[in-house]
Every structure is written in C-alpha cells, then in structure tokens.
Amino acid sequence: MLEWTFFDSWSQWLIIGAAVFLGQFIYAALGFGSGMITITLLTLLYGEVSLFVPFFLLLCIPTELLVSIQDRRHIAFHRTGRLLVFILPTLIGGSYLLAASPEDWLAGALGGLIALLALYYMFFEERLTVQLDWPGAAPLVGTLSGLLGGLYGISGPPLIVYFKSRRLDKAAFRVALLSIFLAMSLLRVVTYSVLKLYTLTVVISCIYSLPFSLAGLYLGGQAHHHLPERLFRRITSGVLLLSGLLLLAKEWINR
C-alpha cells in the first residue's frame, strides 16, 4: 500500500506522522511554529528539505483555512493586505532558491536559524519587545517573511515579531498570522507545482498523512483555549532549540 508514497515502511509513516501531528498541534494552538518544528525534525531525520517543505505545506492549509474562517472578525484586512503586497513576490523568489539550492547548505542554515529563534523566544522575548511602527517596517517584514517562506516553509518569525509589537490579544494574533499564511500557502502551491516540486508520490503521501494533520488541528485548537500560553511557548521554544542544535550537529558531523 505504500508503494505510491515516499514512505519506506509503516514505521517511517508513523514517525513522519508524529512530526506532522506535533507541528499542526502547535500551529492550531499558537498560530505559528509548525514549519519550525516539523520541517526541522523531518530534515534532521531524513534530509531532503526540498521534499518535505512542499509536502508539509499541503497539510497546513486545512488549519489555516479553518482558523481564518472561525476568527475572521479579528482580521485587520488593510494591514494584512499591505503585508501581502511585499510577501507574495519575495515568496516566489524564495521558492526558486529552494529548487536550486544544495541540500547541505539548506540543512545547515536551517539549523542555525532555528537555534537563534529558539534562544530569542526562551530568554529575550519578554525583555526585548521590538517596536515596528515606522514606515518601512511592513515592507521589511513582508520581504523577509516571503523569502523565508519560499525557501524553508518558515515565514513566521518576522511576522511574529511584527504582530507582537502591535500588542494583539491571543485570538487576534493567531488569526493575523494564519490568514496571511493561508494566502502564502495558496501561492506556494502554485509556485511549487510550476517548479515541479509536487509529484503524484508527494500528493499521495500527503493524503496518507492527513489523519495526523487533522488530529493535530483538533487538539491544538482545544489547547489554544485551555493551556496557559506562557507555559506552552516555553515548551515550544525548548523543542525548537533542541531541534536546531541537533540539526547543526548532524551537519557538522557529516562534513
């Protein structure tokens, strides 16, 4: 039954499914972190960034769509549209870099990026609140987010800093991110398809992984309403830091 997928065995299907579940759980609970968690873990275990980024993208769309519809009253469409003007063109550029870049370079850079972000979230987030109310903030944030999204499937960090500076409440913060990610995901699906990063094997593998994704969506949505946000962010940051350091260690050993 697995011959049409890229899974080598049912045990690998379960491992990848667990990573997908974890990413979607965090995504639905916080509004960010799915790519940082799942893409990092899958790259650490199996390499092939250019395979897992398009694969995981398809599995994120149901979460983005559901939250955007449920919490649409919290969306500031003017602000969202202004960011997307700068995000979408650079997203295409990042996608081309994904298709053309060497795997070793991608994996090493990804590990460093994740480790730095995790350290910020763990130790400096509450002390260093960046103010992004100057005129060039939206173009800068949109450009960085688009490039990271196309290249790594991790477009959240610049947007997270931007929306934190706006002092949004938990619900508004989550839907602000996920509504933008939904627009980005739809464009990335088209771009990745043009670049032939999607194959029948990848699509069927996504279908096999969909139950893990939907389970993470449901349970993460419940966690969003019940778990203390500060504790959840601490746990997430710890997982991120460990994943990034392990990825860097693996890259160093392979050289």
Image (cartoon, helix red, strand yellow):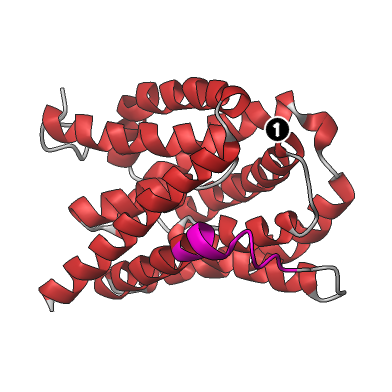
The residue sitting at 45% across, 23% down in the picture is: 214
Q: Is 169 in front, or is 184?
A: 169
**Left or right of residue 82, residue 173 in this image:** left
Q: Is 236 in front, or is 174?
A: 236
Location of residue 5 by image quarter: top left
Position above or below: 131 against 171: below
Image: magenta residue range: 119-130
| Residue 95 can be seen, yes or no | no
For the residue marked with disc 1, what is the amino acid?
Ser
**Residue 221: x, y in percent?**
56, 24
The residue sitting at 45% across, 64% down in the picture is: 119
**Left or right of residue 210, residue 221 in this image:** right
The residue sitting at 33% across, 44% down in the picture is: 199
| Residue 29 can be seen, yes or no | yes
Residue 253 belongs to magenta span: no
Q: Farthest residue toward the bottom?
A: 255
Q: Is 134 in front, or is 208?
A: 134
